[in-house]
Image (cartoon, rainbow, N blue to C red):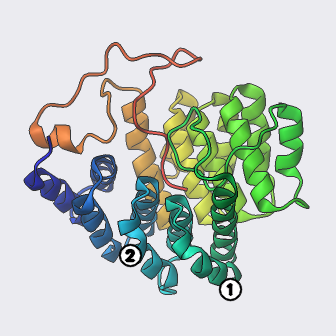
């Protein structure tokens, strides 16, 4: 059982700007796991922060919780043109993830937003809601725990999925479906196909590729992720996602790239590297649970030994499928 006092203590950690960003991230993902109105209230309160990265993750977590009580704050963030594009984008995506048709008309309205990343996000969210209506609910659960902006394609051939992914004449929703099918397929060929998407035209699409590669955690994609992170002309939203993907992959080849940009002049990139380095430490250390706010509060961090291993022989932490998209 979790007490109201414990939820409050974790919430105060989240909203405290004097705390290290990685500690606030762990508090956020703890609240996401706990759920309920108290967690939603604390997460919503943190939208007053000045870190676009943190606010982006707040919106992501509210969407992943799929609790309709989060809709009002997400609508307010989407409508607030003073918010950074990556924050408004994530609010739109979160509204699609919750899956409530009450926001369909609003999402259609913002599908023509002058900020292209917001417009494309809302277009995808509209297609997701329409797909849910046509198919009677959420797609069957896959190997990952995330609520995705599009259901995976039914195609299973990696070559044909790669072709669909990279075909920029196709609707974005179809290419996203190919992306998530490639992620679910896994393996080196799928990782390399996805990594090619880091050179496609849409910044929103490229950032989603970075997120998916972080979920897949395959070392074959590290050179392309590191190259995208190093491109200072790249959209910061893309560089941020590539940094966090490198932290999730957590091979030695990732460490130098993250350290090289820990002082990046772009704040969202710099902060992403800070969080990614914390994730790297988690992935290569002894702690079992990344979202460990409750364990830290109670003074009893959980041990890691005895974890099941994935197909590459790496320990698989439970309940963490990558950071926000």
The residue at the point 79 percent across, 54 percent down is 174
As drawn, is 151 to the left or to the right of 36? Answer: right
Direction from residue 47 to residue 38 in the image, left or right = left
Q: Nearer the viewer, residue 149 or 255?
A: 149
Residue 245: percent from left, percent from top? 56, 43
Q: Residue at x 11, y 55 (%)?
A: 4
Q: Going by the image, does 55 lie left or right of 42?
A: right
Find residue 212 and report its image quarter: top right
Rendered location of residue 273, percent (x, y): 47, 50
Q: Is residue 61 visible?
A: yes
Indicate the secondary structure of the residue bearing disc 2: helix
Which residue does the image show at 40% across and 36% down from the upper left?
Answer: 319
Q: Which quadrant would residue 320 be assigned to in this image?
A: top left
Position above or below: 320 against 232:
above
Near-viewer residue (51 or 31): 31
Mark in front: 1 vs 2: 2
Tell me if I can see residue 255 in this picture: no
Neighbour class for label 2 at 10 Å: few (<14), some, many (≥20)? some
User: Height in image: 253 above or below 10?
Assistant: above
Residue picked out by circle 2: 73
Q: Disc 1 marks which residue? A: 114
In which quadrant will I find the N terminus?
Answer: top left
Closer to the N terminus: mark 1 or mark 2? Answer: 2
Query: Height in image: 112 above or below 141?
Result: below
Q: Residues within 10 Å of mark 1 (few under 14, many from 20)?
A: few
Quadrant of the rendering where the C terminus is positioned:
bottom right
> Element type at marker 1?
loop
Q: CA distance from mark 1 to mark 2?
A: 21 Å
Q: Position of residue 318 (x, y in %)?
A: 40, 30
Q: Position of residue 317 (x, y in %)?
A: 41, 29
């Amino acid at each position: 059982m979790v007490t109201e006092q414990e939820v409050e203590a974790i919430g105060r950690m989240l909203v405290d700007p004097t705390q290290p960003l990685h500690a606030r991230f762990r508090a956020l993902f703890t609240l996401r796991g706990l759920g309920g109105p108290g967690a939603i209230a604390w997460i919503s309160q943190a939208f007053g922060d000045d870190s676009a990265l943190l606010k982006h993750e707040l919106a992501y977590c509210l969407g992943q919780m799929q609790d309709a009580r989060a809709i009002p704050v997400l609508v307010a963030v989407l409508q607030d043109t003073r918010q950074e594009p990556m924050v408004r984008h994530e609010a739109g995506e979160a509204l699609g993830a919750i899956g409530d048709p009450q926001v369909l008309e609003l999402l259609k309205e913002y599908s023509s937003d002058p900020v292209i990343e917001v417009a494309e996000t809302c277009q995808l969210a509209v297609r997701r809601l329409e797909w849910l209506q046509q198919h009677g609910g959420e797609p069957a659960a896959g190997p990952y725990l995330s609520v995705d902006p599009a259901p995976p394609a039914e195609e299973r051939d990696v070559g044909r999925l790669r072709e669909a992914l990279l075909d920029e004449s196709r609707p974005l929703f179809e290419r996203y479906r190919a992306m998530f099918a490639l992620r679910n397929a896994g393996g080196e060929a799928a990782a390399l196909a996805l990594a090619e998407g880091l050179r496609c035209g849409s910044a929103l699409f490229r950032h989603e590729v970075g997120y998916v590669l972080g979920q897949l955690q395959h070392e074959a994609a590290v050179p392309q992720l590191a190259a995208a992170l190093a491109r200072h002309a790249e959209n910061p939203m893309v560089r941020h996602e590539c940094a966090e993907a490198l932290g999730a992959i957590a091979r030695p080849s990732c460490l130098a790239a993250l350290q090289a940009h820990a002082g990046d002049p772009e704040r969202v990139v710099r902060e992403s590297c800070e969080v990614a380095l914390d994730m790297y430490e988690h992935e290569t250390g002894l702690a079992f649970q990344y979202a460990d706010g409750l364990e830290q509060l109670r003074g009893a961090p959980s041990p890691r030994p005895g974890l099941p291993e994935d197909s590459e022989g790496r320990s698989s932490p439970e309940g963490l499928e990558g950071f926000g998209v």
